[in-house]
Image (cartoon, rainbow, N blue to C red):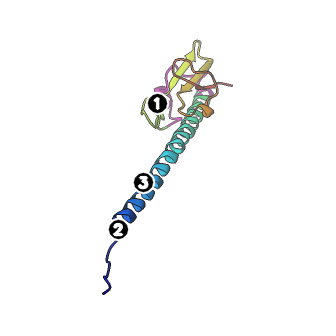
Amino acid sequence: MKKNKKGFSFIELIVVIAIIAVLSVTAILSYGPSQRKSRDSRRMADLEKIRMALEMARQIGTTYPSALPTLVSLGVIQTIPTDPKTKTNYVYGPTPPYYKYSIGASMEDLGSTNIPASGGLNYKVFNP
């Protein structure tokens, strides 16, 4: 007499669960670095957007503004971009008498940096 075996054995289920777990962990680990690079690209684009707005403001006046919110009141930018992860403002450092400036951000991926870390900032854009 032959027995009809229905379903899967315990070993088969364990093997399938282990394979799914390995694939899930691999996907999660490869997703993290791409998110960091994406946020760093956004930071670079934000700083470039601010730089362009500062140059437009300089065309209107004779100097760069003393604070970034002035860019909104001048109408050269709608909103001041913020860091995509922390939602904090980027560091703007005008140098009196406001003919020079730097804008800084803290990059997550060290391959995206352009200066050694100083005060938590490792990427800066300077006026030309």
Q: Looking at the image, is 7 positioned above or below residue 123?
A: below
- Tell me, yes or no, whether the two marked residues, 2 and 3, touch with CB atoms within 8 Å: no
Q: Residues within 10 Å of mark 1 (few under 14, many from 20)?
A: few
N-terminal label among 1 and 3:
3
- The amino acid pointed to by label 2 is Ser
The x, y position of residue 52, in whole percent, is 60, 33
Q: Residue at x 59, y 31 (%)?
A: 110
In-front residue for pair 86/62:
86
Q: Residues within 10 Å of mark 3 (few under 14, many from 20)?
A: few
> Which quadrant: the C terminus?
top right
In the displayed structure image, the side of residue 12 where residue 71 appears, left or right: right
The x, y position of residue 97, in whole percent, is 59, 12
Q: Residue furthest right?
A: 128
Instruction: Give the residue at mark 2.
Output: 9
Q: Looking at the image, is 99 positioned above or below residue 112?
A: above
Q: Which mark is residue 73?
A: 1
Q: CA distance from mark 2 to mark 1?
A: 70 Å
In-front residue for pair 74/125:
125
> Which quadrant: the N terminus?
bottom left
Residue 74 falls within the magenta-colored stretch: yes
The x, y position of residue 70, in whole percent, is 48, 26
Residue 63 visible: no
- The amino acid pointed to by label 3 is Ala
Q: Nearer the viewer, mark 1 or mark 3?
A: 3
Residue 51 falls within the magenta-colored stretch: no
Q: Nearer the viewer, mark 2 or mark 1?
A: 2
Q: CA distance from mark 1 to mark 3?
A: 53 Å
Q: Residue at x 46, y 48 (%)?
A: 28
In-front residue for pair 38/14:
14
Query: Which region shows up in magenta?
Result: 58-77
